[in-house]
Image: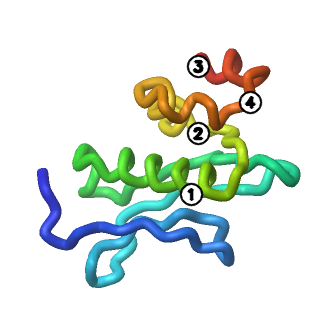
Amino acid sequence: MTHDHAPTVHRNDDTHRYELTDKAGTLLGFAEFRPAGDHAVMLPHTEINEGHEGEGLGSLLARAALDDIRAQGKHAVPMCPFIAAYIREHREYVNLVQPEQRGVFKL
């Protein structure tokens, strides 16, 4: 299914969430983040609002969050099972996870 409202993702540092919104600014989903020391970001939970599941929005959100973490020069700690699965399927993000943590997340 495609979206006519061109969803976008932005990092909201006040709420510690990557927020996915449509063109009108309606929240469609989010991925929580928490600092994990000075060099890593933990991603504990991702949620897509009811009625929008199965539209690829979770993947859009995961990709944007991981790209932002990479741009910050930090590592990701994918505690959220969806984010960990996304990394398993998109191997270009495996290097964001510390080598000693990859086994924990089955990467």
Measured from the top left, where is residue 56 in percent x and y?
Answer: 27, 47
Q: Secondary structure at mark 2?
A: loop
Q: Secondary structure at mark 1?
A: helix
Query: In the image, what residue type sits under mark 1?
Result: Asp
Please tell me in which quadrant of the rendered image residue 107 appears.
top right
Marks 1/2 in contact by CB < 8 Å: the verdict is no
Sequence-wise first label, 2 or 4: 2
Residue on which the image places disc 4: 98
Please tell me in which quadrant of the rendered image residue 2 appears.
bottom left
- The answer to whether residue 84 is above or below residue 31 is above
Residue at x-position 78% and y-position 56%: 35
The CA span between labels 4 and 3 is 10 Å
Dot 1 alpha-carbon crowd within 10 angstroms: few under 14, some 14 to 19, many 20 or more: some
Sequence-wise first label, 3 or 2: 2
Q: Secondary structure at mark 4?
A: loop
The CA span between labels 2 and 4 is 16 Å
Sequence-wise first label, 4 or 3: 4
Query: In the image, what residue type sits under mark 4?
Result: Gln
Q: Which mark is residue 80?
A: 2
Residue at x-position 64% and y-position 47%: 43
The CA span between labels 1 and 3 is 20 Å
Instruction: Locate residue 55 relative to residue 80 in the image: left or right.
Output: left
Residue on which the image places disc 3: 107
The CA span between labels 3 and 2 is 14 Å
Dot 4 alpha-carbon crowd within 10 angstroms: few under 14, some 14 to 19, many 20 or more: some
